[in-house]
Image: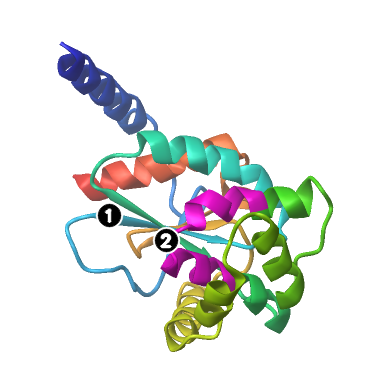
Amino acid sequence: MKKLMLFILLLLNAISVSAVEYDEGIDYKLVGTSLAAPGNKIEVLEFFWYGCPHCYTFEPYIQSWKKSKPVNVKFVRVPAIFRPDWEVQARVYYALSNMGIIEEHHEKIFNEIHNNKKHLDKKEVIVRFLEKNGVDSKKLLKEYNSFAVDGMVRKSIRKQSAYQIEGVPAIIINGKYLVTGSMAGSYENMIKIINYLIAEESN
C-alpha cells in the first residue's frame, strides 16, 4: 500500500510539473557544450561558493529537493572558482569529499561563515575550524594538497568556463540547460524549473 501511495504521489508530481510550461531564453537557457557524465542518470550540477549569501539562502531548497528528487537524477556540487582565493574552499570541499565526510560538514561551513560571520577564506583558518569539529587535520591537509584534488579543481574551472557560469548559485541540468536565480525570479521557482527540465530530459 505504501508503494502504491508513493507511486501515486510521484505521478501527481510529474503531472503538476508537466502542466507548467517554461520558456527557453527566459526561465532557462541552452548551453553550447555538454560535459555531463555518461550514464543512465540525469546529471544536475550546482555551482556554488561557500562565501555567497545567495548560495547559503538557496541551500535549504536544495537540501529539501534532494530528499524528493527522482531516482534517475544524480546531484553533483561544483565549487565555483572566480578568484584565486576561492580555490581554498574548493580544495577543502573536494578534500572532505574524498574523505567521505563532506555531507557532515557542508552545512557547518556555510553556517560558520553566514551565521557566525567568520571568514574561512584562508587555509589555516578553515582547517582549524574543521579540526575543532572533529576532522583529522593531517588527513585533511594530505587530501587538500593531493594530485586528486588538483585534478578536481582543474575540472571545476573547466566546467565553469565551458558552461559560461557568471554567478552562483547556478544549476546545469544534464549538460544542456542553465538555470539561475535571476532567470527564475525566486528560489522556489528555480526548483520548479529544475524539475521541469528533468521531466523534459526524462521523456
Task: Rate crowding at label 2 as few (under 14), some (14 to 19) or many (20 or more) other CA atoms within 10 Å.
Answer: few
Q: Is residue 60 above or below residue 31?
A: above
| Secondary structure at numbered mark 1 | strand
**Residue sitting nearer the eye, 8 or 21:** 8
Q: Is residue 50 visible?
A: no
Mark number, residue 84? none
| Residue found 46% across the figure and 64% down from its top | 97
**Residue sitting nearer the eye, 98 or 54:** 98
Q: Position of residue 76 (x, y in %)?
A: 41, 59
> Which residue in the structure is indicated by mark 2?
100
> Which residue in the structure is indicated by mark 1?
42
Q: Position of residue 40 (x, y in %)?
A: 17, 57
Q: Is residue 101 visible?
A: yes
Give the quarter of the image for residue 168.
Answer: bottom right
Q: Position of residue 106 (x, y in %)?
A: 57, 54
Q: Report if residue 34 lies within the magenta region.
A: no
Residue type at mark 2 is Gly
Give the quarter of the image for residue 45.
Answer: bottom left
| Residue found 41% across the figure and 41% down from its top | 66
| Residue placed furthest toward the top | 1
Using residue 52 as the reference point, say whether residue 77 is left or right of it: left
**Residue sitting nearer the eye, 136 or 69:** 136
Q: Are marks 1 and 2 in contact (CB under 8 Å)?
A: no
- Magenta segment: 90-108
Mark 1–mark 2 Cα distance, whole angstroms, equals 23 Å
Give the main secondary structure of the magenta stretch.
helix
